[in-house]
Amino acid sequence: MEPVTLAALILLGGLVIGIALGVPVAVAMGVPSALAIVVLLGWDGAALTSAQRLFAASNSFALLAIPFFILAGGLMNTGGIAQRLIDLAQVLAGRLPASLAQTTVVANAMFGAVSGASVASAAAVGSVLSPPMRKAGYDPAFAAAVNAAASPAGMLIPPSNTFIIYSLVSSTSVAALFMAGVGPGLLWALVCIVMVAIYARKHPELGGGRRPTAREAGMVFLRAVPSLLMIVIVIGGILAGFFTATESAVIAVLYSLALGLIQKTLPLRALPSITLEAAKTTAIVMLLIGVSGILAWVMSFAKVPALVGDALLGLTDNTVVILVIIMIIMLLAGTVMDPTPAILIFTPIFLPIVTELGVDPIHFGTMMVFNMCLGNISPPVGNNLFVAARVAKVSIEPMITRIMPIFWALTVALFLVAFIPQLSMWLPTVMGLTKP
């Protein structure tokens, strides 16, 4: 057997077996990659190449945005920003049927737009709204399911760490990806709102809330303005060219820290634990990125993307069919993988195929991230499911039953994003961030 063929088999087989056995993803990516390089280059060459690729993948100024956005999310979650956004969401959604559930959806979208962290959003919104929803007579499993389903909107609505990682792998514009995520992110929130409204029709006892007075609504809005300014400063600064995504992440940290201290909602004693948690999360992400550099080199050397592309094009040359196949593969992968490793693994494989078929890399990025959002709310790995269940104090089994109708509706939305490019591409095109 040719060394290149053997290396490709070791790489793909080891990756699939490792993930299936529940091995940590970094190990499942790294060990087969290292063994494949040994087959290709021998022990000495493998040691040198692995070290070079590990360093090269991590040696990027743009990657500094990730730890700072993670830290900013932790500061917002602890510093009271979530509560002010939830209060505003309650004013906006208070008259809709099943108003507390609708507030959960709107609050997740707004908190995600500020922090870019879906898990933090599920924890923050769920911890505030779960008790009043239980008291108002909501099924606790349904309340947790709505929180879990709505929280991934933060991975699509900018700023988004997931888009930053995709931009590094695909060499695309972060600003264009951020704007491309707005349409799919709003679509995600809209689908959740519609599904909650359908549920409310079957449960008329869950009526709308009290209409706030103009004075009350104005006070809530004024309290939320400093939090909402985060979006204007971070995204507006990137689009205006005042600073890069990395610099905007640092500004987000400074802004959220200052806001928490000025409003006296962020205790100084909490800063060490917030920083430590951000460091732990960053370490996991950076290890995955470093190992993915080795994986990408092996795949390129062994011509794995070309082999996969030839296999798909051998089945059909119909763009729609190929996109459907890719979406299904990533949907299945998302049920057992976190977003970061999934994007690091599948982007080098599928991006050359779809670009050959005329799909814009920015558009494909929104498809991938939408897929990973679905993975975040599907068992057995879906982090948001377990976080929402924990803060709502419910078991996972009944919650999964309640979330499935929303999951399937969001799956339909995924295919809308895939086959209606304007949902993703209209805004970045109008803003001149990408070519029409």
Image (spheres, rainbow, N blue to C red):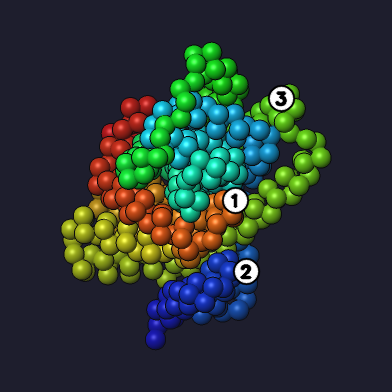
Q: Nearer the viewer, residue 47 or 326?
A: 326
Residue 345 relative to residue 328: left or right: right
Residue 34 position (above or below residue 174): below
Residue 76 position (above or below residue 13): above
Q: Earlier in the sequence, mark 1 or mark 3?
A: 3
Residue found at x 68% / y 39%: 78
- In the displayed image of the protein, which residue is found farthest to the right? 269
Task: Kindly identify which numbered label has been placed on residue 263.
Answer: 3
- In the displayed image of the protein, which residue is found farthest to the top? 215
Hey, which quadrant is residue 27 in on the image? bottom right
Number of disc labels: 3
Is residue 253 visible in the rendered image? The answer is no
Residue found at x 54% / y 36%: 111
Q: Which residue is mark 2?
A: 48
Q: Which residue is mark 1?
A: 391
* Circle 2 residues within 10 Å: few <14, some 14–19, many ≥20: few
